[in-house]
Structure formats: C-alpha cells, structure tokens
Image (spheres, rainbow, N blue to C red):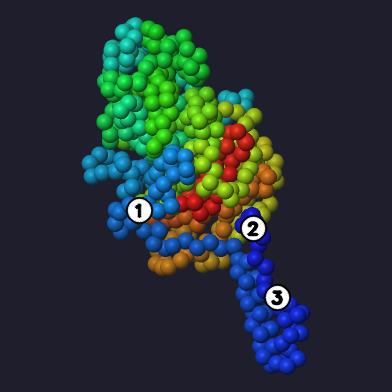
C-alpha cells in the first residue's frame, strides 16, 4: 500500500532506560516484560508487512432490505451550501427507484455499455491528440444535426415537430460519456424559477449539462420525474445563435435566432435541443443564468434520469461556468454499496474540507480538453511494486472518470496485475470461477462468512500520490459465486488508461482547476 501522510507506526522497543530501571531489582519480572515487548513488536511488524484488506462477506449478497441511510456527517454541507447526496441510480436511495418502470440493467448490460463508453473515450482522446483511433466493430453511425424550417423564436414550446432532421450536414462529435443506464451515480438539482427538481447523472467526462424539456416536439424517452417546462420558469431564456456561448459548443446550429446544441454518445445515444439559460439550484445554493441544453430530441440508454450534469473542463461545463463562484473546485464520494448508502457531491472551496488529507497528483491539462488527465506511474499488489516500466503509462496516458465503471489499463500493465493478484488469491485458497464478459479473473466466494481477506491493490500517480483501492472496489461482484477483479485491459498499449468509479469508491475525489491537481482522500463516505 501507499505510505500514509502521517508518520507510520513503529514497532515497540524496550528502551535502555526501561531495562536499566527495572532489571537490577526485578530481574525475572523485567525479563518477562522484555519478552512481552518483543512479542508485541513481532506482531506489529507482521501486521505491518501484511497488505491484505478485509471485505465483509455480507457485502457480496443482495441487500436484505431496501432501506436508505445517510450518515450524519453527510447530511450537511461543508459550509458552502452546495452539498448534494450522491446515490447509485438503481439503489433504494435513488429518486429514480420505484416499483414501476424498467428493471435495473443486468451486469452483462452494464459491462457491455461500459465497454462502449470506453471505446468512445478512446476515440475522443485520439481526436484531440492526433492519434488515429482504431474503428470498433459494431460502432454506432453518427447522428447529424440540422435545424428545420424557421419557427417562432420565443421558447422551445413554439418549435415545430420537424425542427430536427437526420441529415449528413453536420456531424456530432460526442462531448460526453456513454450509456447512462449503467453503473453510474445521480444527484438531484433544481432548474428554473420556481425550481423544478431534476435527477441527473453527474459526469466528469462531459461538459454540456442538459435535461429533457416540454413540449418535447420530436422525441423524449421515459423518465421518472416530470419533464422540465421552460414556459413555467420566469428566468428561462434561449441563447442567441450569434452569441459566443453558442459558438463555444462542439456542435451547434440555429433555429431562427435561437441556438441549438447537439451531443452524441458512444453507443449512438444523443440529445438535441435549444441551448438556454436559467437558474440552477444546487442544494441551497443558486447559479444564475446557467447555460444548459433543453433537449427535445433525445434517444438512447439514459435510464430514467432527467439528463446529465457535465463536470468536465470544457467551456460549457458547470465547473468552468461557475468558476467565479466555486473556483473550479469540486469533490465527490461514491458509496461502497449500490444500495442503502449515500455519498456526496460538493462544489467550491469547502469541497476541499472532506479531502484535507488528500494525496495530490498534478492535473495534466495540456493533454486535451474535457477529461481529467493524470500521470499514472505504477501499480502495487500486496504492497509490492509490479515490474511495469513507467513508459507503459506515460506513452498511453491516463485519466480519471466518474462515468466509467471498470478501470482500464494498458495490456502490459494489466497482465502483471492479473498475475500478481491471481497468485495472491491462490495463496489465500480461493476457488476460481469462470470469466465474465470483460472480466477474466474471477472467484467463487460461496460459503464465506465474516471478513474476507483480499490482496491490497494500489494505483500510484505522479508526485507520489496513491489510491489504495478500498476493499469494496477491488472486486466487481456479479454474485457470490462470481466475484471478479475489477480491472480490464485495453485493446492495445496506445489507448489511454481510465480510472473507473469502481476503484474510486469511498474516496473523496478532489478536482481543483485553479491549482491543477486531482486528489484522493480515503474513507470519506
């Protein structure tokens, strides 16, 4: 594991003064004391050399009830008024859960969608770095954006149903993640005056925030909450097509005098609509004239969420738009379990409070837009550094992403990780299980009770920062008989490594655009 920021505990030793003070008159007693001290030191030394982590066997089983609890320390913000509960969108704490509506996706569907997201990220990175992206089998064809005949320039409510057409006039380069019906996390925001509550996926790999809007003249998927209605908000306004805010978008168009936006995702999902301003409410705080997409043609795997909140580094992101208010600082914590617990999302200088003990690594802003690039330098298993040349990571690069489920590594980094982990698991006596889609190192943990020992896994970054993966993030548990190492290899060594949300669990993940750092603080939720 990585060295803690505090001074490590040292084995107890009998000092010369202690021996001198007790031995002359109480020789036998002193001898016994020294023996006990030596035994204690040996025990501490043995414990210190062990790098196993403990996972509760109960966490491998489905939740016995559907209760939801928020730890007291997470019920209030860090002094900024912007703390929002973060929950898994399919858990009982989620506002999207309910008896009616589609069932949660299967693990097969989750990992298939995750793979498509990763392929999208690799394509996006290749576009911004100039490296050619290898086409993937079955990749979705691009969706195109063209405004229809001019309509009244008041609000989306006046748009004609033929506003958007499929045409080869303008390609939609995606500016975000991937199938949002998978293993992602949601927060509830307010939009408009009075505020309309909308539950959205938050994504560090996206820039443009958007929600579905009434009257939805083209197409809207089924969501849990009522669609946002611009006509009911006294602070809503369309953005002019001539505005620089419109030209800042990756893809934009015009409907009369109004700006249109478009975002396509890696699996073919997309959202198209009016680019607008309105008041955004985050917990008890408000951001005025916030720019967002008012979606009127939305198709794809978005689950029952109302839309998406982009926390990337692009101009249209919440992070950049509200830089003057929050200083480009935010942190979040993803709960260890998908059910029964909540995490948090904080914005502003107070967001650094939960991450006061964060291990910091430089944010590599020159690597490209949107994503949070970092310099990964190595991996440890059971406290031992794996024999992976740093050039393996520096050549491909690495980024941290809240929307990717499974961490992806260059093949020459994944192979030694898998080998070392499997060797340690064999030594612990675990029975192997069949592979599961992209996960090839799986174990049958049937019958185990209490705590389960696992080899510790640590990711090492530039500046000496370490992410000692929580026990809940080492395995991806399909069921108790198929618990798999939660890492997967990229197709080749040129593709960027991605630190996914499974490995981020329980950490306060800190992002600071001003200081250009990313931080990891353990045990935050």
Taking the image as shown, residue 217 lies to the left or right of residue 264, namely left
The local secondary structure at tag 3 comes to loop
Lower sequence index among marks 1 and 3: 3
The local secondary structure at tag 2 comes to loop
- In the displayed structure, 71 sits above or below 228; it is below
The residue sitting at 29% across, 53% down in the picture is 66
Label 1 belongs to which residue?
Answer: 69
Cα distance, mark 1 to mark 3? 44 Å
Label 2 belongs to which residue?
Answer: 6
Q: Residues within 10 Å of mark 1 (few under 14, many from 20)?
A: few
Please give the count of numbered marks on the rendered protein.
3
Residue 468 placement (x, y as % from top left): 57, 53
- In the displayed structure, 103 sits above or below 478; it is above
Q: Nearer the viewer, residue 11 or 322?
A: 322
The N terminus: image quadrant: bottom right
Cα distance, mark 1 to mark 2? 31 Å
The residue sitting at 39% across, 8% down in the picture is 257
Q: Are marks 3 and 2 in contact (CB under 8 Å)?
A: no
Q: Residues within 10 Å of mark 3 (few under 14, many from 20)?
A: few
Lower sequence index among marks 1 and 2: 2
Looking at the image, can residue 59 be seen? yes
Residue 354 placement (x, y as % from top left): 52, 48
Cα distance, mark 3 to mark 2? 20 Å
Q: Are marks 1 and 3 in contact (CB under 8 Å)?
A: no
Looking at the image, can residue 133 be seen? no
Lower sequence index among marks 3 and 2: 2
Q: Nearer the viewer, residue 519 or 448?
A: 519
The image quadrant that residue 21 belongs to is bottom right
Q: Are marks 1 and 2 in contact (CB under 8 Å)?
A: no
Please tell me the numbered disc located at residue 13.
Answer: 3
Q: Nearer the viewer, residue 367 or 293?
A: 293
The residue sitting at 39% across, 48% down in the picture is 75
């Amino acid at each position: 594991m990585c060295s803690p920021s505090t001074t490590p505990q040292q084995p107890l030793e009998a000092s010369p003064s202690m021996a001198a003070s007790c031995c002359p008159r109480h020789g036998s007693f002193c001898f016994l004391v020294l023996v006990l001290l030596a035994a204690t030191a040996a025990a501490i030394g043995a414990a210190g050399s062990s790098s196993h982590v403990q996972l509760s066997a109960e966490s491998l089983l489905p939740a016995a009830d559907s209760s939801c609890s928020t730890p007291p320390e997470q019920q209030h913000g860090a002094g900024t008024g912007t703390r929002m509960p973060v929950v898994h969108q399919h858990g009982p704490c989620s506002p999207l859960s309910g008896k009616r509506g589609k069932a949660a996706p299967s693990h097969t569907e989750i990992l298939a969608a995750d793979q498509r997201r990763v392929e999208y990220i690799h394509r996006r990175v290749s576009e911004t770095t100039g490296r050619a992206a290898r086409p993937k089998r079955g990749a979705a064809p691009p969706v195109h954006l063209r405004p229809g005949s001019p309509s009244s320039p008041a609000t989306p409510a006046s748009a004609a149903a033929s506003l958007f057409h499929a045409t080869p006039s303008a390609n939609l380069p995606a500016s975000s993640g991937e199938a949002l019906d998978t293993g992602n996390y949601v927060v509830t925001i307010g939009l408009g005056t009075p505020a309309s509550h909308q539950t959205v996926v938050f994504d560090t790999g996206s820039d443009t925030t958007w929600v579905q809007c009434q009257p939805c003249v083209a197409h809207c998927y089924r969501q849990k909450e009522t669609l946002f209605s611009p006509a009911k908000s006294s602070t809503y306004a369309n953005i002019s097509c001539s505005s620089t805010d419109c030209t800042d978008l990756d893809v934009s168009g015009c409907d009369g005098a109004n700006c249109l936006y478009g975002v396509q995702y890696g699996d073919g999902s997309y959202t198209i609509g009016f680019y607008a301003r309105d008041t955004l409410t985050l917990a008890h705080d408000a951001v005025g004239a916030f720019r967002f997409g008012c979606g009127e043609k939305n198709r794809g795997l978005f689950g029952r969420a109302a839309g998406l909140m982009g926390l990337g580094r692009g101009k249209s992101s919440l992070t950049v738009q509200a830089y003057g208010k929050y200083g480009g600082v935010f942190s979040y914590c993803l709960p260890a379990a998908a059910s029964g617990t909540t995490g948090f999302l904080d914005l502003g200088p107070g967001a650094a409070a939960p991450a006061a003990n964060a291990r910091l690594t430089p944010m590599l802003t020159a690597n490209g837009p949107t994503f949070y690039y970092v310099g990964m330098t190595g991996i440890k298993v059971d406290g031992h550094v794996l024999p992976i040349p740093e050039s393996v990571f520096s050549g491909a690069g690495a980024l941290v992403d809240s929307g990717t489920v499974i961490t992806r590594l260059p093949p020459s980094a994944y192979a030694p990780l898998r080998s070392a982990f499997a060797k340690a698991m064999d030594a612990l006596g675990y029975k192997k299980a069949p592979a599961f889609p992209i996960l090839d190192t799986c174990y049958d943990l049937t019958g185990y009770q209490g705590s389960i020992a696992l080899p510790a896994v640590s990711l090492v970054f530039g500046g000496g920062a370490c992410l000692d993966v929580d026990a809940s993030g080492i395995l991806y548990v399909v069921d108790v008989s198929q618990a798999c190492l939660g890492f997967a290899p990229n197709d080749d060594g040129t593709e960027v490594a991605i630190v996914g949300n499974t490995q981020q669990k329980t950490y306060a993940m800190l992002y600071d655009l001003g200081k250009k750092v990313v931080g990891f603080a353990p045990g935050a939720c």
